[in-house]
Image: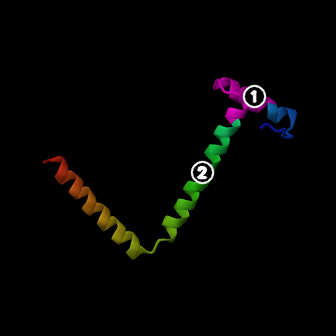
């Protein structure tokens, strides 16, 4: 299914030029832009969650991650 969106001629031309530069259709370029924005939003949400993590929880996570890293290194040397 396709649809029409209303954008200025200048914006349409910019998007088409960007798409052409990458060898993409305009639709594929818009999909790539939307995926990039989705990723940006997910990472911003993750940053907020990490910043809101209490210090004791973060320290516990780091301790456990260190233990897993040590276990992986021990397995690799066997």
Q: CA distance from mark 2 to mark 1?
A: 23 Å
Prevalent SS, magenta region: helix
Q: Nearer the viewer, residue 24 or 47?
A: 24
Labels 2 and 1: the sequence-earlier one:
1
**Quarter of the view holding residue 31:** top right
Q: Which mark is residue 47?
A: none
Secondary element under disc 1, as helix, strand or loop, is: helix
Crowding around mark 1 (Cα neighbors within 10 Å: few <14, some 14 to 19, many 20+) is some
Q: Residue at x 73, y 26 (%)?
A: 17
**Quadrant (top left/top right/bottom left/bottom right) for the N terminus:** top right
Question: Where is mark 1, residue-wise?
Answer: 16
Q: Nearer the viewer, residue 47 or 4?
A: 4
**Quarter of the view holding residue 33:** top right
Q: Which mark is residue 40?
A: 2
Q: Residue 46's spot in the image, x, y percent?
A: 53, 60
Magenta span covers which residues? Answer: 13-29
Q: State yes or no: residue 28 in magenta.
A: yes
Q: Is residue 78 left or right of residue 1?
A: left
């Amino acid at each position: 299914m396709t649809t029409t969106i209303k954008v200025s001629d200048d914006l349409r031309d910019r998007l088409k030029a960007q798409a052409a530069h990458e060898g993409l259709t305009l639709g594929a370029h818009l999909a790539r832009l939307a995926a990039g924005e989705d990723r940006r939003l997910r990472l911003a949400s993750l940053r907020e969650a990490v910043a809101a993590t209490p210090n004791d929880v973060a320290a516990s996570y780091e301790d456990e991650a260190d233990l897993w890293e040590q276990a992986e290194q021990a397995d690799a040397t066997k």
